[in-house]
């Protein structure tokens, strides 16, 4: 009785918070589209990209990499232990990309022209053109990859039978596009060599973005599995709950490998370009903090966790690794960007920019819950158990 | 569907996905330096900071500059030179400003700021709808009807030139100097040049402007620093600057000779090739893992 009452109270508070976020978000959306970008952001002529670009776009896409990483591991490389994570990871990736497009509607000045680069005037010399092309194509691929789940939910076994065989070729196409997309996000910043601090600017940024997205995506799959187990346990079947630990360790192992490759590569790059003297500056300290706290530490935690078979440790490492990649994307796009401008001309986000991002993430979580509580994402549909 | 069939399908899909880009490849840097391309030379040793160029720019361009409710240009009348003391920049209501720099041990130096019209412009290479483009005559121009408002041009510009109309909800656009391309086409001088009383601004062919600049340095040894800003910066700009003090003291950033678009030139071809290689890699991986599973007696999907 008592605990039920407490639960009810908890739900009451939780729903209240969600309602507040949604109301504020709707209000700010109205403000954004009636008073312009300047009405809700601190962007200016020297700082044209801010919190939205860093968080919604760079971080959102990096953590969405779990979709292609897990699908590739399962369908292409035949690592069957990832089975339980495939659909969950694809769902996250789809929603991640979908909400990135929504975020772009806020971010660009004239969102009704977002189709221009495809159908009207192709700026093929622009990295952003490549980014846009990848987003559009990959969104379609992800949607088709999720069609079997949709058809299972709708009970259309005929259509399901048609699309279910596409899984492997789609995983190949998806992996190709996603790899190019993740690297192209790093390539976006190659255009500003004079504006980004040398410790972060590198001609290898495309590769750095790709490798870090791999461990970010895999870590996100682990974090999400953890959250789903806690909050969406009712929609999870025994098989998923039972085999999840094995998949978590698999993700940890792969993430660990990618992190060490990334760690060595980034340090070697700084040394090879003669940027070591910068390490004694303030930016150098911040760089070392990023490398030590946000890459090396989670990498060793992964290593230890996998070796000892400790799911808990791998989960903790995954949380840290995701935060680490978020930090890296913020560093490249905001902290190291315009490092040579006086502090009075630097950018700091407006609370409204952050609130709109929180609003979009909330919508994403609601959409995720809606899908998982209906479609067989965290469980195998009883009609299709092999 | 067997393995071979979908492999070929996959590669065809990727090729189709990449090909529309390949068909239309034209690098923004393709406009090579035309010997007749025009530009402007600004001589800080002659500039007195009278703001005539600012006034001229405003009157010439008033038709294309937005005038919002809180219209603020000029914030002080153009004859008021008091504003020179505060550091200003161009924005969506003005294409040029002159700033005054107090230099120790000498008279203040003035520096004019506007789009430098790069020979290989970063903004044009960054634009994903080709709204910004370099004309063979020299000016870098903008097609407002194409602009999506992504502001990647502003990220790319090493001189922080393009400005955005952030508070416009329905038709926000990028604003920057056009070098008065329509006036040039009609045989007139750019607005700012036409009104300069001190000949601190000279309009002409870029090649000739470089000769004039060198002549001035030779005629008056010791007056100028030995550097024509814009001759080689980011591959060269159509605007050139002479200064009696180091250019960095006038907020002109120290930039290398490499054009900004160079590191990402041919990005789409590279991506296309990467797509081919990756398709083969993932395809082979799939075949190998399939065989491995078969051998170990497991059921392949």
Image (spheres, coloured by chain):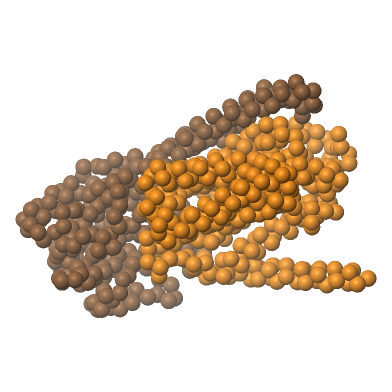
Chain colours: A orange, B brown
Near-viewer residue (B65 or A54): A54
Near-viewer residue (A313 or A53): A313
Left or right placement of residue A131 versus residue B182 in this view: right
Residue B60, position in %: x, y? 29, 65
Q: Is residue A62 above or below residue B247?
A: above
Residue B67, position in %: x, y? 40, 71
Left or right placement of residue A341 versus residue A249 in this view: left
Residue A210, position in %: x, y? 55, 43
Left or right placement of residue A294 versus residue A334 in this view: right
Judged from this view, the residue extending furthest toward the right is: A1
Near-viewer residue (A39 or B197): A39
Q: Residue at x 82, y 47 (%)?
A: A241
Q: Residue at x 57, y 54 (%)?
A: A294
Q: Which of the 4 quarters of the picture holds residue A160?
A: top right
Q: How many marks?
A: 0
Left or right placement of residue B184 versus residue A186 in this view: left
Residue B189 visible to an observer of this rendering:
no
Q: Which of the 4 quarters of the picture holds residue A180?
A: top right
Residue B234, position in %: x, y? 30, 48
Which quadrant, please, contains the C terminus of chain B? top right
Residue A265 visible to an observer of this rendering:
yes
Which quadrant, please, contains the N terminus of chain B? top right
Near-viewer residue (B290 or B203): B290
Q: Residue at x 33, y 57 (%)?
A: B159
Judged from this view, the residue extending furthest toward the left is: B219
Q: Residue at x 71, y 24 (%)?
A: B292
């Amino acid at each position: 009785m008592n605990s039920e009452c407490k639960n009810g109270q908890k739900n009451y508070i939780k729903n209240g918070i969600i309602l507040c976020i949604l109301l504020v978000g709707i209000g700010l959306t109205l403000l954004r589209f009636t008073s312009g970008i300047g009405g809700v952001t601190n962007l200016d002529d020297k700082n044209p990209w801010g919190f939205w670009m860093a968080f919604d776009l760079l971080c959102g896409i990096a953590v969405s990499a779990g979709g292609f990483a897990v699908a590739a591991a399962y369908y292409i490389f035949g690592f069957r232990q990832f089975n339980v994570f495939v659909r969950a990871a694809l769902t996250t990736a789809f929603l991640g990309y979908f909400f990135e497009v929504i975020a772009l509607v806020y971010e660009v000045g004239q969102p009704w022209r977002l189709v221009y680069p495809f159908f009207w005037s192709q700026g093929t010399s622009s990295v952003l053109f490549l980014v846009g092309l990848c987003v559009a194509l990959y969104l379609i691929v992800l949607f088709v990859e999720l069609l079997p789940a949709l058809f299972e939910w709708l009970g259309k076994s005929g259509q399901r039978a048609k699309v279910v065989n596409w899984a492997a070729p789609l995983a190949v196409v998806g992996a190709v596009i996603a790899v190019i997309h993740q690297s192209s996000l790093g390539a976006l910043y190659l255009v500003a060599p004079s504006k980004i601090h040398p410790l972060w600017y590198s001609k290898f940024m495309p590769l750095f973005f790709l490798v870090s997205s791999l461990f970010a995506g895999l870590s996100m799959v682990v974090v999400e599995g953890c959250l789903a187990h806690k909050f969406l346990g009712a929609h999870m079947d025994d098989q998923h709950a039972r085999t999840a630990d094995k998949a978590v360790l698999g993700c940890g192992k792969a993430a660990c490998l990618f992190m060490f490759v990334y760690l060595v590569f980034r340090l070697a790059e700084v040394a090879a370009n003669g940027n070591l003297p910068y390490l004694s500056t303030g930016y150098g300290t911040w760089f070392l903090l990023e490398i030590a706290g946000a890459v090396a530490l989670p990498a060793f935690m992964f290593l230890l966790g996998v070796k000892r078979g400790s799911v808990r440790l791998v989960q903790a490492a995954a949380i840290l690794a995701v935060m680490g990649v978020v930090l890296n994307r913020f560093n490249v796009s905001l902290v190291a960007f315009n490092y040579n401008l006086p502090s009075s001309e630097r950018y700091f986000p407006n609370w409204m920019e952050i609130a709109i991002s929180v609003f979009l993430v909330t919508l994403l979580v609601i959409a995720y819950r809606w899908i998982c509580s209906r479609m067989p994402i965290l469980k195998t549909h009883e009609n299709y158990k092999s | 569907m067997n393995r071979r069939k979908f492999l070929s399908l996959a590669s065809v899909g990727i090729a189709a996905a990449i090909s529309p880009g390949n068909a239309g490849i034209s690098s923004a840097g393709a406009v090579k330096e035309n010997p007749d391309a025009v530009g402007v030379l600004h001589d800080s040793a002659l500039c007195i900071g009278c703001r005539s160029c600012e006034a001229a720019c405003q009157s010439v361009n008033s038709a294309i500059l937005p005038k919002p409710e809180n219209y603020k240009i000029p914030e002080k009348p153009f004859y008021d030179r008091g504003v020179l003391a505060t550091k200003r920049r161009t924005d969506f209501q003005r294409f040029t400003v002159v700033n005054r720099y107090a230099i120790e041990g000498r008279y203040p130096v003035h520096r004019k700021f506007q789009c430098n019209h790069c020979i290989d412009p970063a903004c044009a290479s960054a634009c994903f709808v080709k709204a910004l483009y370099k004309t063979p005559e020299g000016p870098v121009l903008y097609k407002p009807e194409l602009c999506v408002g992504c502001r990647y041009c502003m990220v790319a510009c090493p001189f922080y030139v393009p400005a955005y109309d952030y508070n416009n909800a329905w038709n926000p656009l990028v604003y920057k100097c056009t070098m008065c391309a329509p006036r040039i086409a009609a045989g007139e001088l750019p607005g700012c040049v036409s009104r300069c009383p001190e000949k601190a601004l000279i309009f002409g062919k870029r090649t000739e402007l470089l000769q004039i600049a060198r002549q001035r340095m030779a005629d008056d040894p010791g007056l100028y620093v030995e550097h024509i800003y814009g001759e080689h910066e980011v591959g060269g700009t159509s605007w050139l600057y002479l200064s009696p003090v180091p250019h960095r003291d006038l907020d002109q950033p120290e930039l290398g000779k490499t054009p900004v678009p160079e590191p990402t030139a041919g990005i789409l071809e590279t991506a296309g090739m990467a797509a081919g290689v990756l398709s083969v890699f993932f395809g082979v991986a799939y075949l190998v893992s399939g065989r491995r599973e078969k051998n170990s007696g497991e059921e392949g999907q």
